């Protein structure tokens, strides 16, 4: 047990310290090259209309705070993974060989999803801050980003179905539900839904704190299910997120934006399915509980757009919900801290349900 805990928590601490070390260099590069929006606000929302409330709230920060802060997260995770693999190769008979969590059976798939999301998200951010190209001045179109998420999820879902012979999911308190070939489209739909929840990234420290609790919960679930490599990977993500939060707590030095959100949401999908039937667990069905605030964020957007289209009026001043709280006068810090509290409670409830039922 001691060695197991060392394997899980050593990469966590290592990723945190690596993130702390690389951030000043990254931050200097971001500010030197003015890697922020050249025009504040959204301009056009997801429903196709103007976003005056949002544009007003963010007019002072969008054009002087760099994007791409998510590089701290996946950069520290990748560097930690590379370092531990290298130490394993160089000193195969030492304790370092026990710390290497990169394995084909547990971590190759979620790490691959992380890398794909990081690269495509970085490209989107780069197009936004440079404003180059008539068709890409606002970043990659949502349809293209969804296509990347969908195709990546399709490939991973096929691997689950064909190579790992996973054809079912587990429902809390009920047991296994056989999906057969429908497992593949179900996986893709879950991946797209989780990516859609990335709109929670909108206030200093908000998304980082929520994802920290989510991956902490899955680290605990994987550890309980004896998926030690997956637990170490999830905990390493927590270390990277904590390093990011060190610099993202208000006033933020930079924003996570798409390169971080896309990486985290895509890898979260794989982690959830890795802790499901493949490990006799319930990782997918507890996801809406552990990530309750992600669900609430997406629902608030759906409600807002539907209400505007059908009834011609808004339910919230701004959607998603955390911006509504801003608009009615809550300080950003209050919104963030209360979301963190709820995120922690949701994670605890999810863990308890996953290990007790």
Image (spheres, rainbow, N blue to C red):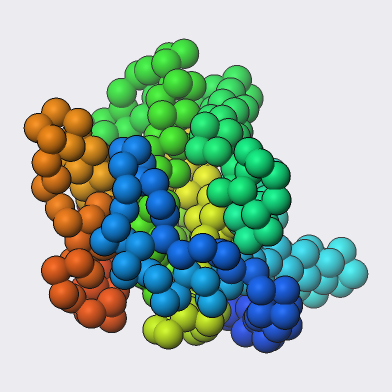
Rendered residue at 47%/28% (across/down): 188
Please state if 305 lies on the left or on the right of 9 as rendered. left
Is residue 280 visible in the rendered image? The answer is: no
Q: Position of residue 294 (x, y in %)?
A: 31, 52
The image shows residue 81, relative to residue 96, as above or below, that is above
Disc tally is 0
Rendered residue at 43%/85% (across/down): 251
Q: Position of residue 277 (x, y in %)?
A: 41, 34
Is residue 328 visible in the rendered image? The answer is: yes
Quarter occupied by residue 205? bottom left
Out of 303 and 24, give the one closest to the viewer.
303
The image shows residue 222, relative to residue 32, as above or below, that is above
Instruction: List the single residue furthest toward the right.
Output: 90
Rendered residue at 50%/38% (across/down): 142
Please state if 140 lies on the left or on the right of 319 as rendered. right
Rendered residue at 66%/79% (across/down): 31
Q: Position of residue 10 (x, y in %)?
A: 60, 77
Please state if 247 lies on the left or on the right of 337 as rendered. right
């Amino acid at each position: 047990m001691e060695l197991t805990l060392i394997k899980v928590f050593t990469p966590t601490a290592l990723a945190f310290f690596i993130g702390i070390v690389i951030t000043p260099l990254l931050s200097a590069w971001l500010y030197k090259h003015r890697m922020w929006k050249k025009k504040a606000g959204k301009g056009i929302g997801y429903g196709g209309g103007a976003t005056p409330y949002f544009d007003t709230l963010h007019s002072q920060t969008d054009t002087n705070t760099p994007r791409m802060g998510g590089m701290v997260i996946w950069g520290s995770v990748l560097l930690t993974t590379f370092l531990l693999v290298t130490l394993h190769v160089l000193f195969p008979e030492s304790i370092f060989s026990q710390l290497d969590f990169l394995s084909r059976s547990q971590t190759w798939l979620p790490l691959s999803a992380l890398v794909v999301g990081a690269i495509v998200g970085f490209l989107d951010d780069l197009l936004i801050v440079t404003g180059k190209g008539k068709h890409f001045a606002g970043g990659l179109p949502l349809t293209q980003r969804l296509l990347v998420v969908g195709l990546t999820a399709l490939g991973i879902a096929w691997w689950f179905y064909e190579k790992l012979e996973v054809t079912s999911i587990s429902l809390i308190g009920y047991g296994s539900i056989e999906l057969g070939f429908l497992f593949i489209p179900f996986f893709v739909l879950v991946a797209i839904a989780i990516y859609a929840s990335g709109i929670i990234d909108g206030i200093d420290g908000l998304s980082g704190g929520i994802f920290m609790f989510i991956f902490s919960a899955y680290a605990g679930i994987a550890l309980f299910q004896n998926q030690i490599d997956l637990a170490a990977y999830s905990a390493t993500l927590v270390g990277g997120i904590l390093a990011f939060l060190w610099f993202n707590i208000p006033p933020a030095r930079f924003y996570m934006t798409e390169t971080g959100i896309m990486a985290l949401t895509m890898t979260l999908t794989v982690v959830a399915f890795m802790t499901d039937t493949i490990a006799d667990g319930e990782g997918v069905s507890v996801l809406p509980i552990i990530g309750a605030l992600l669900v609430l964020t997406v629902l608030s957007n759906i409600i807002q757009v539907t209400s505007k289209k059908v009834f011609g009026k808004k339910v919230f001043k701004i959607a998603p919900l955390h911006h509504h709280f801003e608009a009615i006068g809550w300080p950003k810090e209050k919104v963030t801290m209360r979301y963190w509290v709820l995120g922690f409670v949701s994670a605890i409830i999810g863990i308890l349900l996953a290990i007790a039922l």
